[in-house]
Image (cartoon, rainbow, N blue to C red):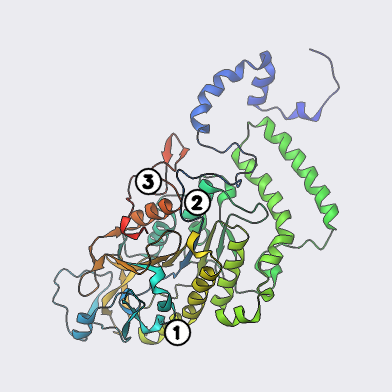
Amino acid sequence: MSDHGTRLDDRLLDRRELLRRSGMGFGLLGLAGLMVGETQGKTTDLNPLTPKSSHFPGKAKRVVHLFMNGGPSHMDTFDPKPLLTKYHGKPLPNPNLRTERKTGAALGSPFAFKKYGESGIEVSEIFARTAQCIDDICVVRSMYADVPNHEPSLLLMNCGDGRLHRPSMGSWVTYGLGSENQNLPGFVAMCPGGYPVVATQNWRSSFLPGAYQGTYIDTQHTDIRKLIENIRNDGISPAEQRRQLDLVNRLNERHLEQHQHDPRLEARIQSFELAYRMQSEASDAFDFEKEPKAIKEMYGTGLHGRQLMITRRLLERGVRFIQVWNGAGQAWDNHENITKDIRHLATQWDQPIEAFLKDLKQRGMLEDTLVIWGGEFGRTPVAELPSLSGRDHNHYGFTMWLAGGGVKGGTVVGATDEFGFAAVENKVHVHDLHATILHLLGFDHERLTYRYAGRDFRLTDVHGHVVKEILA
């Protein structure tokens, strides 16, 4: 060996580096054989958000998930039950009705339903403006989940498992497709007022590389500095910051070479770079004040109109998956005062949703943007004690709808029973919904896998089938 002076690197040898340097690296040959199973399926691209090809041509290129957290009542929104109105105030003739809490008599919807569009699909009066787009919407009235509790149902809807630590749907989508804009996150989660129930677990990347985790945006704010923390550096100039980042990256890359491309370290390097690039592009993307007056009037002046204007601007800039939450609380968890509260909630969303769908369609974006609306479960057809003015949790049957991105608009899939308690026709589990979403994006849900801890994982685990009736 040639002599050389003392180097800092020599003082930081770990066991793997010692094996590599000793005996011309022969010690690593055995280690490589042991590690091969753990590295299969992991990205080797230095930028994990580089655009990728799907298994087959998908009709959808991006996803918007409008999340009505708390569990909206399907009988009051998109699943009319006239027989329930007939039995209002009376016991239901269904001995198998099971609810999470003690409940009273039948609670008919206080809202009128009306047929809309050429398809003639019935929609509640509280979503009359959204109903103007019903011919572009597929209403799935036969959804069901596993349990009637918020926490596991939120995780099931977002991550495919209600108990175990799993990557979120948005993380799987960005893992599979990458992002079309390297200066913005591939996956954005907008939730005004703080985190929802189970917080960041709803958009976590889990064992997928950290670059695929959702970036949280608190959309109660309008100032870009409050929307995205640390988006500005007031201490140094952009040129000085660039030199600092280059130095940090050189140190990280040297460390990465010594640690056989540790995906966690790769993700950290990418997060530094992304944060720097976002400083200019994010400011423009979130500046909805640049929208023409007519567009702002179309969306309305409320919070959700602002969220959906920002969503469209992010879609235009190549963001792959956007989740738009109702808010930090469980607003749609209407155990009482359902007449007043649901109308208020729907009023906040109805105009922005109509504007968003029509805006996407006018710009030619709806055909390759998949829009999903719904919560983690539905509500019971009977009134909850003691107030008898609201509905309990119900995972046996509920409604979601999809639009754009290869969806067969103007259709209804499945049905609940005549009172709206349980899905009985063409039942669609959350796993089936996930399989269908991935199919619309061009993925065989059984093949979109990631090897971790000695086995292959996927969003749908060992479940799920594509609901062909949803497909155009």
What residue lies at 62% left-to-right and 15% top-to-bottom? 26
Indicate the amino acid at tag 2.
Answer: Val
The quarter of the picture where the N terminus appears is top right
Residue 327 seen in render: no
What residue lies at 21% left-to-right and 75% top-to-bottom? 419
> Which tag is nearer the camera, tag 2 or tag 3?
2
Position in image of residue 389 (x %, y %): 32, 85
Kindly identify which residue carries mark 3: 461
Among numbered discs 3 and 1, the one appearing first in the sequence: 1
Res 312 → quadrant: bottom right
Among numbered discs 2 and 3, the one appearing first in the sequence: 2
Please indicate whether residue 352 sits to the left or right of residue 291 in the image. Answer: left
Kindly identify which residue carries mark 1: 344
Position in image of residue 53 (x %, y %): 52, 44
Residue 280 got which mark?
Answer: none
Q: Which type of secondary structure does the marked residue at label 3 adopt?
A: loop
Q: CA distance from mark 3 to mark 1?
A: 38 Å
Count of picture labels: 3
Residue 191 seen in render: yes
Position in image of residue 446 (x %, y %): 38, 43
What residue lies at 44% left-to-right and 43% top-to-bottom? 448
Kindly identify which residue carries mark 2: 173
In the displayed structure, 57 sits above or below 195; it is above
Q: CA distance from mark 2 to mark 1?
A: 33 Å
Indicate the amino acid at tag 1.
Answer: His
Position in image of residue 351 (x %, y %): 49, 80
Q: Which type of secondary structure does the marked residue at label 2 adopt?
A: helix
Q: CA distance from mark 2 to mark 3?
A: 15 Å
Q: Circles 2 and 1: CB distance less than 8 Å?
A: no
